[in-house]
Image: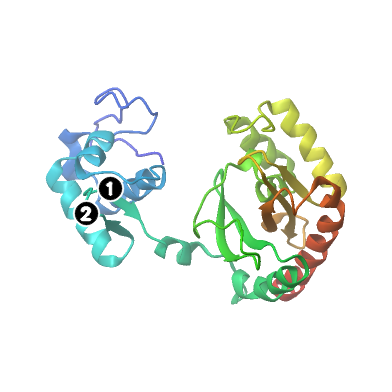
Amino acid sequence: MKIAPVSGKRTSTERNGNGNGRPVLGLESDSQVPALQRGLAILELLGTHDQGATLSEIGVELGLSPATVFRITGVLEEAGYVRKDEGSRRFALTKKLLLLARPQHEGRSLVESALPAMREVLRQTGETVQLCTLAEMECVIIEQLPSLHPFKYIVDIGSRPPVHCCAPGKAMIAHLQEAERQELVRRVKFTGFTPQSITTRRGFMEEMTNVRRDGFAVDRAEHFEGIHCVAAPVLDRTGHAVAALTIAGPSARIAAERFVELGEIMKRAVRDVEHRYFV
């Protein structure tokens, strides 16, 4: 989030040495920065801290006074957008923001349009089914139906798996417009989570070619050892990805030999979602 300088005061990452490239509002201009701008900056910061952040940490990273951070987090907490852990005193985002971000098309909810197809995939595969969308550079899980098996893979709604090593992220990126895809890939940090992770831009672009050819994407235990995923993109009328459906589970059940079979199931499922959502 870029914060413009206020009243001639420049924004800086050097002033408090946070070193993370996030613009700092600056204590001297604190009272002059609009409250909305400060509140959005706090929400964005918390979005990058999986374990939350304390009042002090928020103030240091954004260059805001303790009183300002206390006041704004209090308003956000009262509105239900953040919560405070009384033990650690750390603030974290709630799922309320996801309700605002859930895609709508002509009054139709993407989640509601996807649920019938998700239930059918669950019936056919027995594996956890997830609906994901892209938010900036992140893949965000916005709905989930847990596996029917005793041993299952499930995550919290709102989880953000790395786009370069999760099947829904690959499926959506492969079906972005070329310029948008190139820009997103340029900004991705190709972190290796397992020996199977794609860690180079060239390797990822080759993967994108395969995804566009096959119509589905796979995660070969690239994020978590022993977990495989198969996903297909939900496309609008221009062929642009707006979401993805994925199944996720143990590699013993979602074996590589089944990728094509499961890919076809996911492709049929997203066609149903597209019909309900766009038609």
Q: Quadrant of residue 62?
A: top left
Q: Are marks 1 and 2 in contact (CB under 8 Å)?
A: yes
The correct choice, above or below, for 205 with respect to 139 in the image is above
> What percent of the width, then of the height, locates residue 115?
65, 73
Q: Quadrant of the N terminus?
A: top left
The mark that comes first in sequence, 1 or 2, is: 1
Describe residue 189's horizontal placement relative to residue 34 as left or right: right
The dot on residue 38 is: 1
Q: Residues within 10 Å of mark 2 (few under 14, many from 20)?
A: some
Q: Residue 268, percent across and down?
A: 82, 66
Which residue is drawn at the image coordinates 66% and 33% (left, top)?
197
Amino acid at circle 2: Ile
Amino acid of disc 1:
Arg
Q: Residue at x 75, y 46 (%)?
A: 218
Is residue 51 positioned above or below 86 on the image?
above
Q: Secondary structure at mark 1?
A: helix
Q: Please identify the quadrant where the C terminus is shown.
A: bottom right
In the rendered image, residue 186, in percent from the top left (x then y), is placed at 63, 30
Farthest front residue in view: 150
| Residue 94 percent coordinates (x, y) | 37, 60
The quadrant where residue 120 appears:
bottom right
Against 189, is 101 above or below? below
Per the image, the residue denoted by label 2 is 72
Q: Residues within 10 Å of mark 1 (few under 14, many from 20)?
A: many
Q: Which mark is residue 234?
A: none
Q: Could you tell me which secondary element the residue under label 2 belongs to? A: helix
